[in-house]
Amino acid sequence: QLQLRESGPGLVKPSETLSLTCTVSGGSISGSSSYWGWIRQPPGRALEWIGHIFYSGNTYYNPSLRSRVAISVDTSNRQFSLQLSSVTATDTAVYYCARENNGLGPWGRGALVTVSS
Amino acid sequence: DIQMTQSPSTLSASVGDRVTITCRASQNINSWLAWYQQKSAKAPNLLIYKASNLETGVPSRFSGSGSGTEFTLTINSLQPDDFATYYCQQYYGYPYTFGQGTKLEIK
């Protein structure tokens, strides 16, 4: 069945760029009606939708992060990626990737990213 | 942004109980609402999509209803595995937004 897994550094310094990759297995990332999304959850807090991408490259970002975020897709490797620039401590969170098709699912296991010097 | 407000924030119940969680949207979202269950330190799991459709593999004791601005998630005959945090999410308008969560605790 379709599975997603996040990968990337668990520690990022303030003002630097957070980079995560989501690898999709058990299915295709292209040629479907699904979007591929990123969601984050600061410790002890609720979920926040970051943005999503279609396999063609069309994106939409949460306006609260739009000036700092970029999502890209690599269909040949069945991956999509998140970059969040100029991070601060408030960007510390578990970052999830998920397929979007009438709701979000399945989800990756999540990647904890801590912003600290 | 469309604000999603869940109530209650915390709910105490016993195994076998029937519980209802409410989610209100700040504007009409038709039926573009999903419900998720999240257990500690795990990724959320999709339970219900388009307000009332049960995701494949989710037990039938879970059900969703509503449209417009008011929605409910009902769990019949609570099982020990159901004690978790539940979130609603609208996907009618950008940016997609979540409720603040409802923690379902054992009484």
Image (cartoon, rainbow, N blue to C red):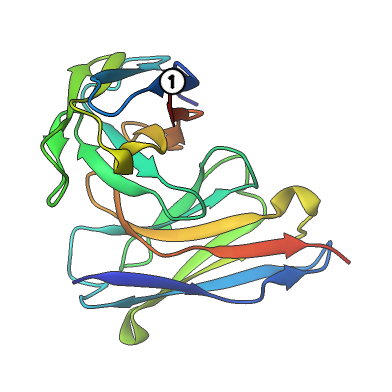
Q: Is residue A107 above or below residue B56?
A: below
| Residue drawn where x is 82% and y is 68% of the image | A13
Q: Is residue A31 left or right of residue A25?
A: left
Total numbered badges shown on the rendered structure: 1
Residue projecting furthest to the bottom:
A76
Quadrant containing the N terminus of chain A is: bottom left
The reply, left or right, for residue A58 in relation to residue A1 is: right
Instruction: Tell me if I can see residue B4 in this picture.
Output: no
Question: Residue B64: where, in percent of width, then height?
Answer: 19, 26
Note whether B65 is above or below A89 in the view shown.
above
Q: Residues within 10 Å of mark 1 (few under 14, many from 20)?
A: some
**Could you say where residue A21 lies in the image, as x and y percent from the top left?**
50, 74
As drawn, which residue projects farthest toward the right?
Answer: A117
Q: Is B78 in front, or is B63? A: B78
Q: Residue at position x 23%, y 70% from top?
A: A2
Residue at 66 percent across and 64 percent down: it is A113
Res A20 seen here: yes
**Residue designated by label 1:** B11
Left or right: A34 in relation to B2: left
- Asked whether B29 or B41 is in front, the reply is B41
Residue occupying the point 24% across, 72% down: A30
Q: Amino acid at mark 1?
A: Leu
Is residue A20 depicted above or below A107 in this figure?
A: below
Q: Check disc 1 and report its element: helix, strand or loop.
A: strand
Q: Is residue B61 above or below residue A57?
A: above
The residue marked by circle 1 belongs to what chain? B
Measuring from the top left, give residue A92's x and y in whole percent: 70, 54
Q: Residue A101 at what x, y percent from top left?
A: 23, 51
Among the 4 quarters of the image, the one containing residue A117: bottom right
**Image-quadrant location for residue B24:** top left
